[in-house]
Image: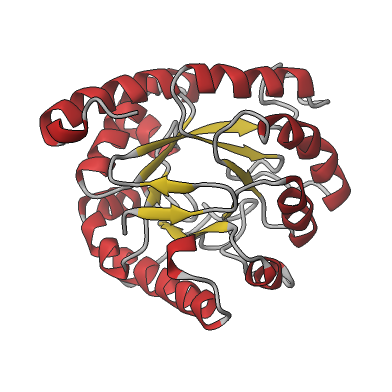
């Protein structure tokens, strides 16, 4: 599929797109772990656009292993000011949330995409998206919940299992009248998966393309890269860029990243070789 239809934009997927991550959580910018720096989050949006991000993904819930979810009220307090700023920047804006109340508030502001790590499984989430005429949605696979997902993830065959889950969630949305061009899928690298599970999903990523949906993949700074390289999260930029390029080579349409500028540069080189007819397009 060459288009991802969202609330305000039909995103051209004939070349890979970079989704920049804006985490509006207490430890995202200052590291203090107490309060959210909204001004820093807004400035980060602007900076990622300057580095070449095609889409911004803004979220107020930390989904790292062991993380506890904020209340709905706290999540709204964190993300709404940043979303209000972001929707005026002229690019597609995604909200990373599983809460129906946050989804509804974000869509009312003009946010383009609902990016849900729980694939609209919370009560009311599917209704919000199905009731909206044009909003894009990304369905992600996660085994368990962030607080416990890495304790003992188990699969029969991880690629088959992830594909079956995403196919079922995609079919449920379609049955509720959501157009296929609005729906993207994400295998959920690092969300209830071992190192080998994650590597298998990358090796066999093309098996997920048979669903016919745009594929969004997020390898950025994941712990698997730390296991492979021995580096801390902040030192995984190079490994993250390498994983993003490998994902694109295997058919990913959108890569979700923290380090936008080096990813954009690496993709420019990749496009010059693999997509020379599109290498100069914006």
Dividing the picture into quadrants, the one containing residue 98 is bottom right
What residue is at 67 percent from the left and 51 percent from the top?
97
Can residue 25 be seen in this snapshot? no
Does residue 170 appear to the left or right of 149 in the view shown?
Answer: left
Q: Nearer the viewer, residue 122 or 274?
A: 274
Residue 86 appears anywhere in the view: yes
Residue that appears at 79% across and 39% down? 80
Decide: is 171 above or below 41: below
Image coordinates of residue 187 in percent, x first then y, are: 40, 56
* Vertical side of 93 occupied by 44: above or below: above
Q: Is residue 161 left or right of residue 70?
A: left
What residue is shown at x 73% (from left), y 72% (from top)?
A: 123
Front residue of this view, candidates 30 and 7: 7
Quarter of the image for the N terminus: give it.
Answer: bottom left
The spot of residue 236 in percent (x, y) is 40, 23
Q: Please, is residue 135 above or below residue 81 in the view?
A: below
Q: Which residue reaches farthest bottom?
A: 175
Residue ID at (24%, 25%): 280
- Locate residue 131 relative to residue 165 in the image: left or right: right
Instruction: Work out which residue is located at the far right of the displayed protein and give it.
Output: 73
Q: Is 136 left or right of 281, judged from the image as shown?
A: right
Q: Quadrant of the C terminus?
A: top left
Picture mark count: 0
Say how the picture is coloured. secondary structure
Q: Position of residue 248 (x, y in %)?
A: 26, 42
């Amino acid at each position: 599929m060459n288009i991802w239809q969202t609330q305000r934009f039909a995103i051209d997927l004939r070349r890979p797109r970079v989704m920049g991550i804006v985490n509006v959580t207490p430890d995202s910018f200052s590291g203090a772990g107490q309060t959210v720096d909204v001004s820093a989050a807004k400035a980060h949006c602007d900076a990622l656009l300057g580095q070449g991000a095609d889409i911004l993904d803004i979220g107020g819930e930390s989904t790292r292993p062991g993380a506890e979810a904020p209340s709905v009220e706290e999540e709204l307090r964190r993300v709404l000011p940043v979303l209000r700023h972001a929707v005026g920047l002229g690019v597609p804006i995604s909200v990373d949330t599983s809460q129906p109340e946050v989804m509804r508030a974000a869509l009312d502001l003009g946010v383009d995409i609902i990016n849900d790590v729980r694939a609209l499984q919370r009560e009311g989430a599917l209704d919000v998206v199905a009731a909206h005429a044009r909003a894009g949605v990304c369905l992600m696979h996660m085994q368990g919940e962030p607080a416990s997902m890495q304790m003992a993830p188990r699969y029969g065959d991880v690629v088959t299992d992830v594909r079956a889950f995403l196919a079922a969630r995609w079919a449920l949305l379609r049955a509720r009248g959501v157009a296929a061009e609005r729906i993207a899928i994400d295998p959920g690298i690092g969300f209830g998966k071992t190192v080998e599970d994650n590597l298998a999903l990358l090796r066999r990523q093309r098996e997920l393309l048979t669903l016919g949906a745009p594929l969004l993949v997020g390898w950025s700074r994941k712990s698997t890269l730390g296991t492979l390289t021995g580096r801390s999260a902040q030192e995984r930029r190079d490994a993250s860029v390498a994983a993003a390029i490998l994902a694109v080579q295997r058919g990913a349409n959108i890569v979700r990243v923290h380090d936008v500028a080096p990813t954009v540069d690496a993709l420019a080189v990749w496009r010059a070789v693999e997509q020379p007819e599109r290498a100069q397009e914006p």
